[in-house]
Amino acid sequence: MKKVWMFALVSLVLAGLSLPSRMVSGQEKLQFGAAFRGSARYDLVSWVAENKGYWKEQGLKVEWIPFKAGSLMFRTVAAGKLFIGVTSIGSFIQAASRGVKVVIVADLKSPQYFALWVKGDGPIKNGEDLRGGRIGISRKGGSSHAYAKMLSRRLGIEKDVRFIGLGAPRVRVASLKSGAIEAFIQTMNPIANLVASGEVRELISSKEIVPKGYIDYLMFSEKGFLERKPDTVARALKAVLQSVEYIANNPSWTKKKIQRDFGFTEKGAELTMTEMDFTGAGRAISPEAVEATVDFFVKNKIIKRAPPREGLYTNKFVR
């Protein structure tokens, strides 16, 4: 009898050890992707969610996985290696148009206006001066490439410039300074100090061409994952919304954090915060906004075929 009880006890212990991680630790492991590293818009959300305990409050143990470009992240999604994350609309809409099964689960209301930047004291003053030049992008097929094509088309020089994949913003900046390129495409966040000091100057911005209600910085889920684990998606989104709300509601903390972590000057931090915004994150997405955003990419010939609007987004998890 004693042996029977001992066997039963050992069996229970082993069974406990073989339970899924969420059952054992009380936390579900989740890999959460980010299209970019080195931008306050992306990096701060991760830091706040982790260090303020928002992931933990939602029963999640999150591994934050940043990529060098959105196109690389969505290749990982297409390969079945990643299922949820944050990105800009440019890389999302291109992935969706190529058949990657992804769904917008929240508009985070943080406009990312891509701009073409040139040397502040350089000879390029207008689009004509850039004709025949080289424009640095992160990688072909991503958001930076999409906006670089749009803006060069707006300047009337799309067929007369070369797009050079260079990776991170610091490489693009170094290439501009060395003369390897004449301009590069980038949002404000990673280069705010250079903008504040006048080292780089905006030639043209996407703010001039995007439609009203344009969806930009967003959280997405792979469709199958959303169907299998809607509760996980809902909890992850809640933690992200808590993070962006904290960032928006604590400007003094945010400014100091940006200055300390990214080495921004006071003016650089202020420029970053103005663009980052986050006001209204998590509100319901309107069909009109989705329609206008998709049409924008079709009209600008960034995608050849629009993905089906139905199933492209959901308001199931937002206010």
Image: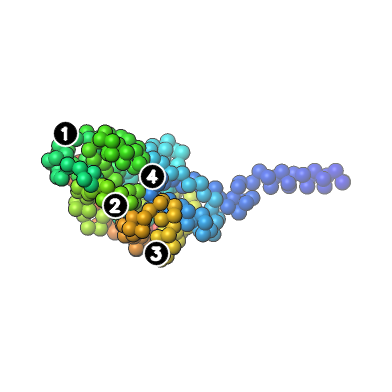
Of the two numbered discs 1 and 3 on the same chain, state the one appearing first in sequence: 1
Badge 2 or badge 3: first in the primary sequence: 2
Q: Which residue is mark 2?
A: 197
Separation (CA) of disc 1 from disc 3:
43 Å
Residue drawn at 48 percent across, 50 percent down: 229
Pointer 3 residue: 251
Q: Quadrant of the C terminus?
A: bottom left
Report the residue marked by disc 1: 132
Task: Specify the amino acid type for callout 4.
Answer: Ala
- Residue 132 to residue 294: above or below: above
Q: Residues within 10 Å of mark 4 (few under 14, many from 20)?
A: many
Q: Amino acid at mark 1?
A: Gly
Image x and y of residue 101, in percent: 37, 43
Label located before the other in sequence (4 or 3) = 4
Task: Answer few, some or many: residues within 10 Å of disc 1's Cα (few below 14, many 20 plus, some between 14 and 19).
Answer: some
Which of 258 and 222 lies nearest the eye of the viewer?
258
Viewed as shown, does residue 172 lie left or right of 301? right
